[in-house]
Image (cartoon, helix red, strand yellow):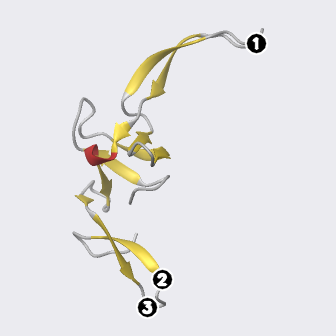
Amino acid sequence: MRLKKDDTVKIIAGKDKGVIGKIIKVDTENERVYVQGANMVSKTMKKRNQQDQGGITKVEAPIHVSNVAIVVSKNGETSKLGYKKDANGNKVRYAKKTGEVI
């Protein structure tokens, strides 16, 4: 999977289309990512101790990796990712649209 934690992505399909956020968790086995502040669902939390409130909270639900694209510029432009070797021979990710190394 080419996307990694802390990458800034834009959701390109689904109910939160157009939302930009950071990836907070990556599930490589199921090809899903959790984006901060996107695809929020209500979850009931059980009260675990005296200080814990419990109740209904909003949490991020996973989004399939095909429904997000990495943001490469300040104005929210997206691109596909590729791999290439740099001058030292290390494998690096780059944006195919702009050619810049990420």
Which quadrant: the C terminus? Answer: bottom left
Amino acid type for the residue under numbered disc 1 = Gln
Mark 3 and mark 2: Cα distance apart in space: 7 Å
Residue drawn where x is 40% and y is 52% of the image: 8
Q: Quadrant of residue 17?
A: top left
Q: Which mark is residue 90?
A: 2
Foreground mark, 1 or 3? Answer: 3
Please count the marks in the image: 3
Q: Secondary structure at mark 3?
A: loop
Amino acid type for the residue under numbered disc 2 = Asn
**Marks 3 & 2, CB-CB < 8 Å contact:** no
Which of the marked residues, 2 or 1, is nearer the chain's N terminus? 1
Foreground mark, 2 or 1? Answer: 2
Q: Quadrant of residue 63?
A: top left
In the rendered structure, the answer to whether residue 53 lies left or right of residue 41 reads right
Mark 1 and mark 3: Cα distance apart in space: 55 Å
Q: Secondary structure at mark 1?
A: loop
Q: Position of residue 31 (x, y in %)?
A: 38, 46
In the rendered structure, the answer to whether residue 92 lies left or right of residue 18 reads right
The residue indicated by pointer 1 is: 51
Residue density around tag 2, few if under 14, some if 14–19, many if 20 or more, within 10 Å: few
Residue drawn where x is 23% and y is 44% of the image: 12
Which quadrant: the N terminus? Answer: bottom left
The residue indicated by pointer 3 is: 87
Residue 6 drawn above or below residue 89: above
Q: Residue extending furthest bottom?
A: 87
Which of the marked residues, 1 or 3, is nearer the chain's N terminus? 1
Mark 2 and mark 1: Cα distance apart in space: 50 Å
